[in-house]
Image (cartoon, helix red, strand yellow):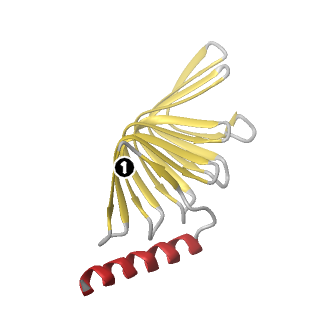
Amino acid sequence: MKKNIFLLLTFLIILTVSTSCFAAKPKITADNTYFDINNAAYILTGNVYIETGDRIITADKAKVSMLSMEVWADGSIKLTQNDVTLTGDSVYANNAEKSATISGNVCLERSNLKITAETAIYNWQTKIAVFKNNVVVEKDGASSSSNELNYNFTTNSIL
């Protein structure tokens, strides 16, 4: 009984500290949700939805650390922030660094623009994404390729 009370108090302290350290408490839903009290992390499977402020990550499965505010997600991921949408196979998002690394079949589509790559690193503070490895750009009917490309979402331009 004492152990259960201790674990419950530990969980409440962790939850209080983690939510007070970050501006926005994430909204988390999934078909199957498990909270690992030892690591203060959600383990999620099936129709995963994670919303923090104006950022949304959807995936097949994910782990969310409430202490470090990090997200590891796999399977049909989609990262959305306002008018920014990136898709891929997996994502690692770090709230402290204000960045997300999307890996595998990365795709950005906007009107008259499509960028695909193996990896993209998106900084949601600067609104700049760095696309790496086998980058293909299709813009206004023309196609080009490179190993790396920087894209500014604010100005809708390739840097």
Report the residue at 75% width, 38% height from top.
155
* Residue 128, x across and y down, in percent: 63, 46
Q: Quick one: which residue is furthest to the top in this view?
A: 141
User: Looking at the image, how many numbered discs can be counted on the residues?
Assistant: 1
- Image quadrant assignment for residue 42: bottom left
* Residue 98, x across and y down, in percent: 57, 59
Front residue of 144/25: it is: 25
Q: Tag 1: Cα neighbours inside 10 Å, few (<14), some, or many (≥20)?
A: many
* Residue 38, x across and y down, in percent: 29, 72
Q: Is residue 72 above or below residue 31?
A: below
Report the residue at 51% width, 77% height from top.
17
Front residue of 27/141: it is: 27
* Residue 79, x across and y down, in percent: 52, 41
Q: Is residue 151 above or below residue 112?
A: below
Front residue of 2/133: it is: 2
Q: Quick one: which residue is furthest to the bottom in this view?
A: 2
Placement of the C terminus among the 4 image quadrants: top right
Q: Amino acid at mark 1?
A: Ala
**Residue tagged by mark 1?**
62
- Image quadrant assignment for residue 68: bottom left
| Left or right: residue 66 compared with residue 61 | right
> Judging from the image, what secondary structure is the residue with disc 1 in?
strand
| Left or right: residue 40 compared with residue 27 | left
Report the residue at 36% width, 77% height from top.
8
Q: Is residue 141 above or below residue 89?
A: above
Placement of the N terminus among the 4 image quadrants: bottom left
- Image quadrant assignment for residue 9: bottom left
